[in-house]
Amino acid sequence: MKAFTQLNALVAPLDRANVDTDAIIPKQFLKSIRRAGFGPYLFDEWRYLDRGEPEMDCSNRPLNPDFVLNQAQFQGAQILLTRENFGCGSSREHAPWALEDYGFRAIIAPSFADIFFNNCFKNGVLPIVLSPELVDSLFKEIETGYQLQIDLEAQTITTPSGRVIQFAVDENRRFRLLNGLDDIGLSLQHADKIKAYETERAKRAPWLFRNA
Amino acid sequence: MAGKTLYDKLWDDHVVHREDDGSCLIYIDRQLLHEVTSPQAFDGLRLAGRQPWRLERNLAVADHNVPTNHRDQGIADPISRLQVDTLDKNCAEFGITEFDMSDIRQGIVHVVGPEQGATLPGMTVVCGDSHTSTHGASAALAFGIGTSEVEHALATQCLVQKKAKNMLIKVNGQVGTGVTAKDIVLAIIGTIGTAGGTGYTIEFAGTAIRALSMEGRMTVCNMAIEAGARAGLVAVDETTIEYYRDRPYSPKGDDWHMAVRYWERLHSDSDAKFDKVVELNAAEIKPQVTWGTSPEMVVAVDAAVPDPEQETDAVKREGMQRALQYMGLQANQKITDIAVDRVFIGSCTNSRIEDLRQAASVIKGRQKAASVKQVLIVPGSGLVKQQAEAEGLDQIFLAAGFEWRDPGCSMCLAMNADRLEAGEHCASTSNRNFEGRQGYGGRTHLVSPAMAAAAAIAGHFVNVAEEQGASA
């Protein structure tokens, strides 16, 4: 996983609440057995005027000019600013894969759906929760297209005017993201504890261990 | 010390290791696998040279991509076929039990798990699928995960988790005639919203929940995720225990008695503290129909489509306007005036035998309306299909002009060939009415199996409570 330390990048505003994972990456693209290559299909039904199909070449597809990611001033954005309950719906990790593959490394919203929030951290994407008022103020400021500076070590966002916004992030997740650490390797450091747990649990619930 | 909630008990029983910041390594008793969210996890294992920690704790079944007719001809779409073949190959390579497409036990992963007794009370259950919350109906702590966590659970039989907060939703009293588990859970989502349960595990309780069968409780817990909660729970009672007696993977002999004693403690203590309590009166719940593109956009069948002009919150108002435009509906239009083009009865929410009986019971020898293009009945598993045929339900459906299909996720998310055309309205027993969910431009209305079947007959939504009340 890519480490996340600092990011100084353009922000794209997606001014909708309850953006679901079907909107982020429609189901037909979930048929892929690979982990990469979802970026061109991110927000497919909003981004293009035609119907997207898996493995389609997107370079000549008709773009929806009204969709924010198609507007000139937001090209190259790596930070997505959006509204409540972003990422609701299915558990598909293809959603953060698509966001990351497109180029987004951070998402700012007043709230996120739990599974999506968790999946972001596994993929080097930082979801940042700010109050609805702060998010609202950012929406008003960035209409012309501007950069935000995010520092995960310091847990701060700095606006072009120099305003510094603090954000909270779970310590364990922050550590893993800062260092780009593989969760499985870290958990396997506790292999003895897992085995001890199984021995003890097998006494309490032996029916769960009959086919071992 | 205050008593424990059911969730507290399940959590405490599975903690392997606790970090300073409160995150825990939680033991996973059962992982269910399907073809869409597992290939990259198996690839990850191969790349790192890792083996599954405990093979027998995994059970795999293909469901999202499988065709629901002409199954003997295989899967026509080569990309879907590759995904299902990849699951077969991965299971064979690693030695994981799989019910493949030719197996009578094949079906939707969340129907198969309880049906086989593979997901039991007191277990932790995960699957790369958000509707894993279904299994909480048996007081299992069950939640959906992403593919990185599928790989993590395969490799370590554990997951790193932070404990959620406790929410209690009590549905008091009794529901009226024609009101089902689906209507209860849609009414709950309409009350607390799609983010109302975010950060919580929801325990469903109260007399109306107790009165539900296990299958009804599965319908309720299935849609906990649509209220934002990763996990839903119902405490163990006699209904739970009877359901698991003699299931293929249920404990046998002395193990059974020992397990039952353990399961009987799986309820919240009377002095347990919840972070949030919501109460609903079951008698006030009417058959529900969603009108928009989020499950919280739901009203009673005898109501009208809400008017965005009455909404004071600007973000919500815009969301409502966008939803009405997408759905091709007008504010203040009566729900019973909405015509349906297709009907889908199936999905991990409503494809079990009782759902099919419920749908069949409203037909009463009538035919689907001529204006309805297609009515798909997709049983949740091969065993559900077999049972329905033994009861003659398939004949009732076929006589009404409905289509009787093979098991799978089908038009719930339209990854296989079953889908809506743009602009079509569908009365669907599934769980999500998101834009494009059932097909590009498709317009989904979430309802119960009885409501879906009644809409198929009438060609528009009708109030089954009135119909059934009149004939009762």
Image (spheres, grey):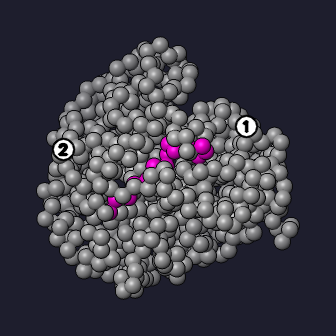
Magenta span dominant secondary structure: loop
Label 1 neighbourhood size at 10 Å, few (<14), some (14-19), many (20+)? Answer: some
Residue drawn at x 43%, y 43% as measured from the top left: B84
Residue drawn at x 29%, y 55% as measured from the top left: B95
The reply to whether residue B323 is in sight is no
Residue flagged by tag 1: what amino acid is it?
Leu
Label 2 neighbourhood size at 10 Å, few (<14), some (14-19), many (20+)? Answer: few
- Front one among B419 and B398: B398
Give the mark, 1 or 2, whose residue is nearer the N terminus: 2
Residue flagged by tag 2: what amino acid is it?
Ala
Q: Report the disc number at residue B329.
A: 1
Would you say A90 lies left or right of B301 here?
left
**Chain to which mark 2 belongs:** B
Q: Is residue B131 above or below residue A206?
A: above
Residue drawn at x 48%, y 50% as measured from the top left: B101
- Which part of the image, by quadrant, shows the C terminus of chain B? bottom right
Label 1 or label 2, whichever lies nearer to me, is 2
Q: Is residue A201 above or below residue B165?
A: below
| A118 magenta-colored | no
Q: Position of residue B281 (x, y in %)?
A: 65, 69
The region drawn magenta spans B57-70
The residue under label 2 is: B48
Secondary structure type for disc 2: helix
Secondary structure type for disc 1: loop
